[in-house]
Image (spheres, grey):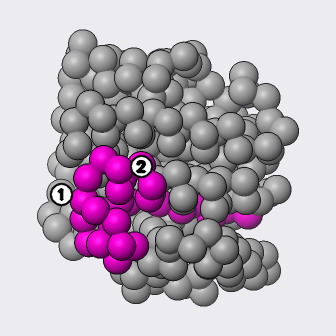
Amino acid sequence: MTGTSPLDPFGARLRRAMDDRGPLCVGIDPHASLLAEWGLNDDVAGLERFSRTVVEAVADRVAVLKPQSAFFERFGSRGVAVLEKSVEEARAAGALVVMDAKRGDIGSTMAAYAESFLRRGAPLFSDALTVSPYLGYGSLKPAVELARENGAGLFVLALTSNPEGGEVQHAVRADGRTVGATMLAHLAAENAGEEPLGSFGAVVGATLGDLSSYDLAINGPLLAPGIGAQGATPADLPRVFKAAVRNVVPNVSRGVLRHGPDVGALRTAADRFAEEIRAAVAPV
């Protein structure tokens, strides 16, 4: 266990976990091709074996685990039951859980999504949730409020690693600011005055190269997909994130998961990435 109080805000718990275990986030992405690589059937039994093995291997040593809910939801209620158990076991082992569900809606629907993942005691309660702000940042208000009440956090899609994201995120508003920059500014406002780290983070791809035109100093965490299979390396992090690199949570999925189903091999891969990230970030 990380020794952090469950009542502390997510940002404070994340800061301690990153300082204690390193900032690595390992994805739990049980898509069909990866199940096959592990010699597992593409069914609920394979899903359960995969998820339990990942949790057993790394939940006691990494700061964050990030299950992708879609790969569980595709199996219906039995898949969601596996997800609930995975979240419970990961958090019991001391990892913080970021639910990668990318929810986004308005009003009571957004509130219901928030209740599903951010209300303490809910079967799928997670330490943080990924959300989409592209119905307007204000549409996230129910999730922001519930996260604050329950010591949870959000990761808002801001500058994503997929090539298609640019047509929205780099679009320039009437005030001359890009949409992505606008989302970062909203998050900086949410985190103002929070110590040691705010609870409202941004998703910013590690593959994006020069981001010097964006202010990443949001006093919150930056979830950075793209390390490993998508081409970015730990050594790229200081160049991409510059002064904000200490608050980066680099996500690695296939780079670790392809070493399964051997628990020892998964642990070795996670430890290697964690050390490479520590070495890359430490001098900054």
Disc 1 to disc 2: CB gap under 8 Å: no
Please report the residue visible at 62 percent of the width from the left and 25 percent of the height from the top: 151
The percent position of residue 85, horizontal first and vertical second, equals 50, 36
Question: Does residue 123 appear left or right of residue 196 in this picture?
Answer: left
Determine whether 151 is above or below 251 in the image: above
Quarter location, residue 131: top left
Q: Earlier in the sequence, mark 1 or mark 2?
A: 2
Q: Secondary structure at mark 2?
A: helix
Q: Amino acid at mark 2?
A: Glu
The percent position of residue 86, horizontal first and vertical second, equals 51, 42
The percent position of residue 212, horizontal first and vertical second, equals 47, 74
Q: Which of the two residues, 183 or 165, is positioned nearer the viewer here?
A: 165
Cα–Cα span, label 1 and label 2: 36 Å
Task: Name the disc covering residue 168, or none.
Answer: 1
Q: Secondary structure at mark 1?
A: helix
Question: Does residue 8 appear left or right of residue 207 in this picture?
Answer: right
Which part of the image, by quadrant, shows the N terminus? top right
Segment colored magenta: 22-50
Quarter location, residue 244: bottom right
Quarter location, residue 105: top left
Q: Which of the two residues, 226 or 160, is positioned nearer the viewer here?
A: 226
Decide if residue 175 is in sight here: no
